[in-house]
Amino acid sequence: MKNKGLLITTIIFFLIVNTTYYWEGKLGHFAFPAFLILLTSFLGFGVALIKQIYFLVKEKFAVKKRLINIGILTLVLTLTFLKPFGLIDFEKFESDNILIAEREGAANCMTILKLKDNFTFSERSVCFSVTEIKGTFHLQNDTIYFDNVSVGRQENKFYKFAVTVPSKFKKDGKHFDLILYKSLSDTVGQELWITKNDLNKLKNNKPNR
């Protein structure tokens, strides 16, 4: 019975790790405790594997079910160690990224904004928590307007529009920054560094409304 329970929890752990892409951004401040739980579980399964190997040797390899448990534990732990964010990159099945802008803050906090060619966007912020904001956008001249915004747990509003400007740090005419504004009266804005910009591909396209 214990072996069956170990097998079931191992499979559940593997499924949770491999679906991180879909649930992590919805946890907000609970993302860090969830990470600790998964890490503790990983270490716990490692201890369980050692015990299973010990009992297998003690039983002189007579219990076949224990061999199955060891095989599954070894496979799950190895794959999780090599691919801690899951075996499948689910973003590859989504629309292509047209613009990517990011900014790294203090304590390695990171914000990444991605605009896609189907006129949807997502902003992911990782800083002691994980938040994800999604919505749609449309272009008007050189301005990006954000629409239908769905904010995360820790957010209550998002930027209204954004514009691209020449980079302050690389003044070669080839690098640009993205400045996001919360309103027309916002004179400061939030600066992100553009790492990919193919917005010109959308000039003649219109979002589906």
Image (cartoon, grey):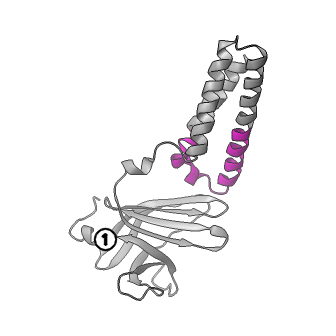
- Quadrant of residue 43 in the image? top right
When the figure is inspected, residue 207 is found, relative to residue 72, above or below; the finding is below
- Quadrant of residue 68 in the image? top right
Foreground pick, 123 / 88: 88
Residue in the image at 38% along x and 87% along y = 172
Q: Secondary structure at mark 1?
A: helix
Residue 40 on the magenta span: yes
Residue in the image at 60% along x and 30% along y = 11
> In the drawing, does residue 17 fall left or right of residue 144?
right
Residue 90 pos. (x, y %): 44, 47
Residue 170 on the magenta span: no
Give the position of the C terminus as an image quadrant.
bottom left
Disc 1 crowd rating (10 Å Cα; few below 14, some 14-19, many 20+) is some
When the figure is inspected, residue 158 is found, relative to residue 190, above or below; the finding is above
Residue 137 pos. (x, y %): 36, 66
Residue 168 pos. (x, y %): 47, 87
When the figure is inspected, residue 11 is found, relative to residue 32, above or below; the finding is above
Residue in the image at 62% along x and 68% along y = 109
* Extent of the magenta region: 16-43
> In the drawing, does residue 58 fall left or right of residue 81?
right
Mark 1: which amino acid?
Leu
- Quadrant of residue 148 in the image? bottom left
When the figure is inspected, residue 42 is found, relative to residue 183, above or below; the finding is above
